Amino acid sequence: MKKIILTVLLATVLIGCKKEAEKTNEDISTTDSTDIQDTAQPEAANVSLKSVSTQQTADFLQKKNDTLYVTNFFATWCGPCVKEIPHFKKKIEELKDQPVKITFVSLDQKEIWNTEVPRFTMQQGIQNYTVLLDGQLLDGNFFTSNFKQWTGNAIPFTFMRRGDKTDETLGMISEEQLNEKISSLLK
């Protein structure tokens, strides 16, 4: 009997959440979004993001020289990914005169590569540091060949390399962690 009551209660909550989400979406869509779309579209159309293959990505991840390569794998729909972007932007500005290259790799679906992703990167101010990678092409070999920790099961993921030294962070990275890891690899 408890299972039945619990199941009914859970179903009611889920249906209520769905209806609330639909109501919110309806409220958003009833606002006059024509002006917003008209101004956002040309900006997004002016942003041309480079797409990279899995091989190009692997080659980039394996670069071993005196430059610190910080590569952040993200998606526009990923909340933790969005939250950590300001930390990376701050480091880009702080380290602009040092041998540090910060790259964002969007794993978003190809269907939104020319619309939502450019718009998002413009809003975030990372369009000059972002490349597109078709996440559907990533297989187990890609992950085992390039990473110790990441199997592709979650994002965000940050990979850092300077010479033979590497560091991996699975999940959201705090500003403090980012600062510490970059400082450690620059020593």
Image (cartoon, helix red, strand yellow):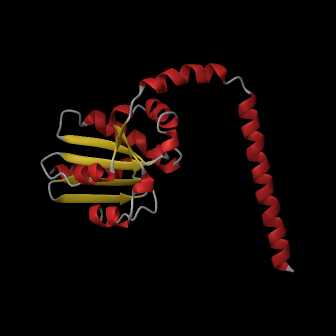
Q: Which residue is drawn at 37% across and 66% down?
A: 140
Of 82 and 152, the residue lying toward us = 152
Whether residue 180 is visible to the viewer of this picture, yes or no, is no
Q: Residue at x 42, y 61 (%)?
A: 152
In the image, is 90 to the left or to the right of 119?
left
Question: What residue occupies the far bottom of the structure in this picture?
Answer: 1
Of 38 and 66, the residue lying toward us = 38
Percent across and percent down for residue 118 are 46, 33
Of 72 and 91, the residue lying toward us = 72
Percent across and percent down for residue 131 are 36, 41
Q: Above or below — where is 165 with respect to 5?
A: above
Quadrant where the N terminus lies?
A: bottom right
- Count of all numbered marks drawn on residues in the image: 0
In the image, is 3 to the left or to the right of 131?
right
Q: Which residue is drawn at 81% across and 78% down?
A: 3
Whether residue 94 is visible to the viewer of this picture, yes or no, is yes
Q: Residue at x 72, y 32 (%)?
A: 29
Q: Quadrant of residue 101?
A: top left
Percent across and percent down for residue 85 are 41, 42
Question: What residue occupies the far left of the structure in this picture?
Answer: 66
In the image, is 185 to the left or to the right of 45?
left
Percent across and percent down for residue 165 are 18, 59
Q: Above or below — where is 44 with respect to 61?
A: above
